[in-house]
């Protein structure tokens, strides 16, 4: 049984692509550049809550 599980584990490891660290770094840099800062996010959250409240009150 253990041999079967070891075989399965090795097959799964072989099928899993290795991470591309360069691409990961580029993606993180892009996300940091495009995602709002925590201050902007807080304001966006407040505006979203206001919009939801208005939508509910119009129903």
Image: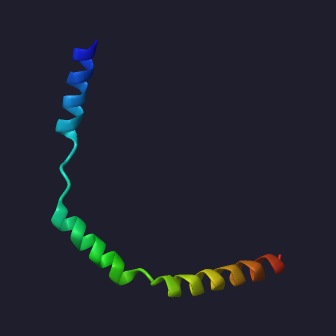
Residue 51 is situated, as x and y percent measured from the top left of the image, at 69, 83
Above or below for 27 versus 46: above
Residue 41 is situated, as x and y percent measured from the top left of the image, at 53, 82
Of residues 53 and 9, the one nearer the viewer is: 9
Figure colour scheme: rainbow
Residue 48 is situated, as x and y percent measured from the top left of the image, at 64, 80
- Please give the count of numbered marks on the rendered protein: 0
Q: Is residue 52 left or right of residue 24?
A: right
Of residues 17 and 43, the one nearer the viewer is: 43
Which of the 4 quarters of the picture holds residue 15? top left
Which of the 4 quarters of the picture holds residue 49? bottom right
Q: Is residue 28 left or right of residue 20?
A: right
Above or below for 20 versus 52: above
- Which residue appears farthest toward the top when viewing the image? 1
- What residue appears at the point 41 percent right and 80 percent down from the top-left corner? 35
Residue 28 is situated, as x and y percent measured from the top left of the image, at 29, 72
- What residue appears at the point 64 percent right and 85 percent down from the top-left corner? 47
Of residues 19 and 39, the one nearer the viewer is: 39
- What residue appears at the point 28 percent right and 12 percent down from the top-left corner? 1
- What residue appears at the point 59 percent right and 87 percent down from the top-left corner? 43
Above or below for 2 versus 44: above
Which of the 4 quarters of the picture holds residue 16? top left
Q: Can you say which quadrant of the picture contains the C terminus?
A: bottom right
């Amino acid at each position: 049984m253990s041999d079967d599980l070891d075989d399965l584990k090795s097959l799964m490891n072989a099928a899993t692509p290795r991470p591309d660290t360069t691409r990961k770094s580029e993606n993180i840099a892009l996300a940091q550049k495009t995602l709002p800062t925590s201050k902007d996010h807080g304001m966006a959250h407040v505006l979203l809550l206001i919009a939801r409240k208005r939508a509910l009150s119009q129903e």
